[in-house]
Image (cartoon, coloured by chain):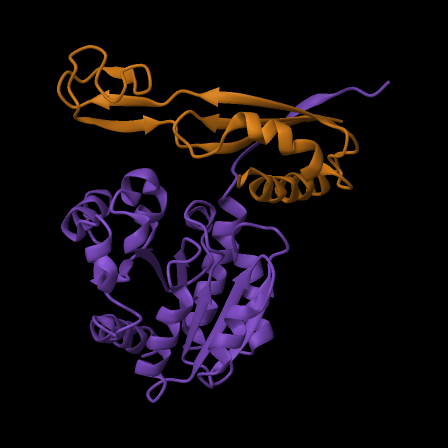
Amino acid sequence: MHELGILVEVVKTVEDFARKNNLEKIDTLVLQIGELSEIVPQYIKECYPAAVDGTMLDGTNLRVDILPGNGICQKCNKVFNIIEGKGKCTHCKSRKFEVISGHEFMIKEVIAC
Amino acid sequence: MDSFKVFEIKKSVYENNDAQASLLRTKLKEDKVFLLNLMSSPGSGKTTTLVKTIEALKDEFSIGIIEADIDSDVDATTISKTGVKVIQLHTGGMCHLNADMTRQGLEEIETDGLDFVVLENVGNLICPAEFDTGAAKNAMILSVPEGDDKPLKYPGIFRAVDVLIINKIDAAEYFDFDLEAATQRAKKLNPNIKVFPISAKTGEGVEAWADWLREEIKIWNK
């Protein structure tokens, strides 16, 4: 359960961004979490109210977009979803691939004025 | 009526911390202070290993220890008996140390005149692996009773460290721990990882670990 600690970092970054861009009111924060990252989106959502308590983000909405865990097969050169293929290329069943996305944890944007 | 717009941030969550960590590392390099970030599960023998490490190196280097725990000062009390400088940080529930907390700890311990500082991170195999503290090198301890399957279960930390210390090897016969399998699993995740099997209790293997550390401290502080 490390999501709360990480969210505290997120809140600091967003507050910093808001100050620099003179944002007055934030409505929604949008995060992107990769399917292969060690962050659990459900826990992020549950921790959010506690992490933003007393900050500029208090009372704001949170949206989490999930980014696919994709790999490129080194045998057939096709892109496939690693989770769907359970670690094997969904086209040729090869286990040799390179991860191209899915480890991200990004602050995408805020909806604000 | 407020008109809401989308403001793109597009920033990795770890970016701030990574930037602070690299600033801290540059400063430590200038000040000739070698910072080791030591991570492990609770009960792996971190403090006992530290005591043995201090005994091996205290005649050559001026050492400082930063203990981080959610609460209590039992570890700091044990370490202070070795005579080195030690402070206790309380993370207040946080499961890891970030670069900023590390910087505060270094300010508190006053690194002037110290060559070698160990940051004893919170006992946890997940979160500390994701936050760069600004340390020169990262090490972790895996102890025999935890099992040789830990690299499979917590790959993140094995990828993040320079050194894997396998502790409590004197107890290997009581546990189904395959040293070779654990080493291979760690090397598969991290081909450059250095592995030191030790027993902090009997002192076995501690010399090889201390030798590695001595060389790294000398290179860093040159």
* Res A36 seen here: yes
Compared with B113, B211 (above or below) is above
Q: Residue furthest bottom?
A: B59
Q: In this view, does A66 lie to the left or right of A109?
A: left
Which of the 4 image quadrants contains residue A82?
Answer: top left
Which of the 4 image quadrants contains residue B116?
Answer: bottom left
Q: The orange chain is which one?
A: A
Nearest the viewer among B136 and B214 is B214
Compared with A42, B63 (above or below) is below
**Residue at position x 13%, y 20% from top?**
A75
Q: Is residue B166 left or right of residue B39?
A: left
Quarter of the image containing the N terminus of chain B?
Answer: top right
**Residue at position x 47%, y 59% from top?**
B121
Nearest the viewer among B172 and A60 is B172
Q: Residue B140: horizontal and vertical position, in percent?
A: 34, 57
Q: Residue furthest right?
A: B1
In the rendered picture, chain B carries what hue? Answer: purple
**Residue at position x 25%, y 70% from top?**
B209
Q: Residue A60: horizontal and vertical position, in percent?
A: 73, 27
Quarter of the image containing the C terminus of chain B?
Answer: bottom left
Q: Residue B100: horizontal and vertical position, in percent?
A: 57, 58
* Res A109 seen here: no
Q: Is residue B167 left or right of residue A44?
A: left
Q: Residue furthest top?
A: A91
Compared with B79, B3 (above or below) is above
Q: Residue B158: horizontal and vertical position, in percent?
A: 31, 48
